[in-house]
Image (cartoon, helix red, strand yellow):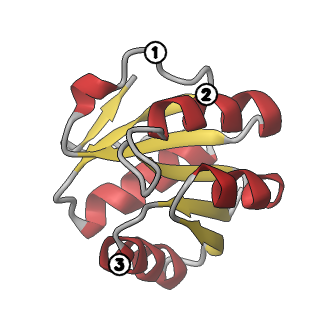
Amino acid sequence: MKSVLIVEDEIFIALEIERILQDAGYTVVAIAADQTEALAAGATAKVAFVDLNLRDGPTGPGLALELADRFSMRIVYVTANPNQIEQPARTAVGYIRKPFSEDAVLAAAAIAADPESANVIHQDVIII
């Protein structure tokens, strides 16, 4: 489970997540800035890092639900406002807070890739 979709409208944040993941051997299938772009790329990813506030508004929580339902991909929320996650997606593994560390991104990716056997515990990855 190495294919990742990044749903983030702040390009520098998206590029930093992409760099971290690619350096660790993950394939970033797309960077999406809104719901339309994310749903178009969703079928090709196993994991999505989803920001809550996107170019088209605070659509991340609903989008995560749709990505989980439609594509069964694991969800990692990326947010400075975790209280906006009212109803986590059924495949959500947790969230990392902005600003995030490289270790937090990698730990979240490892947990999303294999939530059953991940021994990765990181103080910045909050499990849902």
Residue located at (54% from left, 56% from top): 34
Task: State the mark number for residue 16.
Answer: 3
In the rendering, at what x and y percent does residue 125 appear? 29, 41
In the rendering, at what x and y percent does residue 27 appear? 66, 75
Query: Residue 123 falls in which quadrant of the image?
Result: top left
The mark nearer the N terminus, 1 or 2, is 2
Query: Residue 101 falls in which quadrant of the image?
Result: bottom left
Along the viewing direction, whichever of 15 and 119 lies nearer the viewer: 15
Q: Are marks 1 and 2 in contact (CB under 8 Å)?
A: yes
Task: State the mark number for residue 87.
Answer: 1
Mark 2 nearby-residue class (10 Å; few <14, some 14–19, many ≥20): some
**In this view, the mark in front (1 or 3):** 1
The mark nearer the N terminus, 1 or 3, is 3
- Quarter of the image where the N terminus is located: bottom right
The mark nearer the N terminus, 2 or 3, is 3
Q: CA distance from mark 1 to mark 2?
A: 8 Å
Disc 2 marks which residue?
Answer: 65
In this view, 34 is above or below 74: below
Mark 1 nearby-residue class (10 Å; few <14, some 14–19, many ≥20): few
From the viewer's perspective, tell me whether residue 49 is left or right of residue 46. Answer: left
From the viewer's perspective, tell me whether residue 42 is left or right of residue 24. Answer: right
Q: Are marks 1 and 3 in contact (CB under 8 Å)?
A: no
In the rendering, at what x and y percent does residue 109 appear? 49, 54
Residue located at (61% from left, 72% from top): 26
Residue located at (54% from left, 29% from top): 62
